[in-house]
Image (cartoon, grey):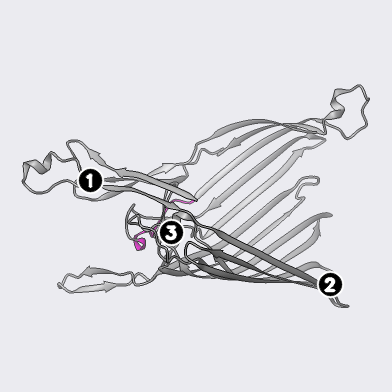
Amino acid sequence: MFNYQVWEWNMIDSAGYSMPYPMDDNPADRDLVPLYFTDLTGMDILSNRLSAFVQDAYHIKLDSAAFSLGGGVRLNYWDFNNEFLVSPRLNAGLKPNWEKDIVFRFSTVLYHQPPFFKEVRRLDGTLNHDIKAQSSFHVVLGSDYEFTAWNRPFKLVTELYYKYMYNLIPYDVDNVRIRYYGENIAHGYAAGVEAKVNGEFVPGTESWISIAFMQTQEDLDGDSYTQSNEDGSIDTIYPGFITRPTDQRLNFGIYFQDYIPNNPTWQLHLNLLFGTGLPFGPPNSERYMATARMNPYRRVDLGLSKRLHTNEKEMPETSVWRHFESIWLNLEVFNLLDINNTISHTWVTDVRGWQYAVPNYLTVRRLNLKLIVKF
């Protein structure tokens, strides 16, 4: 059961007026304090969900390769919209008898995501009892390659994927606030490639490098707007595919560990992250307007660790330290370079109705001291 109450309003205030500002000459209207946006609704949902899942796997060893095949099906039923869903899935793996230790993977699934309670609420506050599950068809190709370099073990994991999505419920993101349209009015896709290599770049430590490219877009059914030309004619524009709120084209990361030579009780780690900006647009606007981009996300973290105790050697029964497996003291500096990373925007509106985006930033440089004790 869900009991969902919303009391949300937005007043844009300035010196001597509030928005929307009455533009007529009626003095009585100028004494009003209009609200720019209101959402005062409530809803109760009492429903039942039923689900079941079955799966199995087979392993076959041949002279030239080892083969694995797995499959399953998930069943869902929700009496809120009387929708019964069947989600089959299949995955396969192939490990050739090569000198190189490599495994090839393939998986595909028809996935249905039953809506949660916020997704069934339309923008006008009414409930959509005809809402359907958002659905997608996935295809993933991947490989795991284990190798040795500089006499140390490494592993390279790569994946190539494509996902076609239909019955999408569009949504807007404003900081931590998410508003769903409450209607299955879009279709889209997500496609990308990822690669990550991890291993002992420094003997006895674990480090990794990763890079990922991804694009995800959606097309709202029947959306359009008109545009006036200088000659007085009016054109109808169909936006077509636009970026989804999660469309982050590039992600790159490095995590590197090292220790002081001849003194491995002191360790150092460095974490570097870079991601291209997410799309955004004015609040309470049409989806096709959310095509601006935030600045790229950049962050550098630095950490220093000191091992105070380890139970590697046998200790006397009377020693209290024998009860502890290890004790570490860590000092970390988050956002070492004190970079201003944008998380959202505050929109300022003037009397003409023009809006200006003022960025809100994530936390600045932070120090973190922690003690890790393992028993």
Q: Which mark is residue 120?
A: 3
Classify 10 Å Cα crowding around label 3: few (below 14), some (14-19), many (20 and above). Answer: many
- Residue 322: image x %, image y %? 87, 28
Which span is picked out in magenta? 287-296
| Residue 310: quarter of image | top right
Of the 4 image quadrants, the one containing the C terminus is: top right
Q: Which residue is mark 1?
A: 350
Residues 272 and 225: in front is: 225
Q: Is residue 259 left or right of residue 320?
A: left
- Residue 191: image x %, image y %? 55, 68
Q: Residue at x 59, y 54 (%)?
A: 252
Q: Which kind of residue does numbered mark 3 sit on?
A: Val
Q: Is residue 133 left or right of residue 69?
A: left
Residues 375 and 239: in front is: 375
2 or 3: tag closer to the N-terminus: 2
1 or 2: tag closer to the N-terminus: 2
Classify 10 Å Cα crowding around label 2: few (below 14), some (14-19), many (20 and above). Answer: few
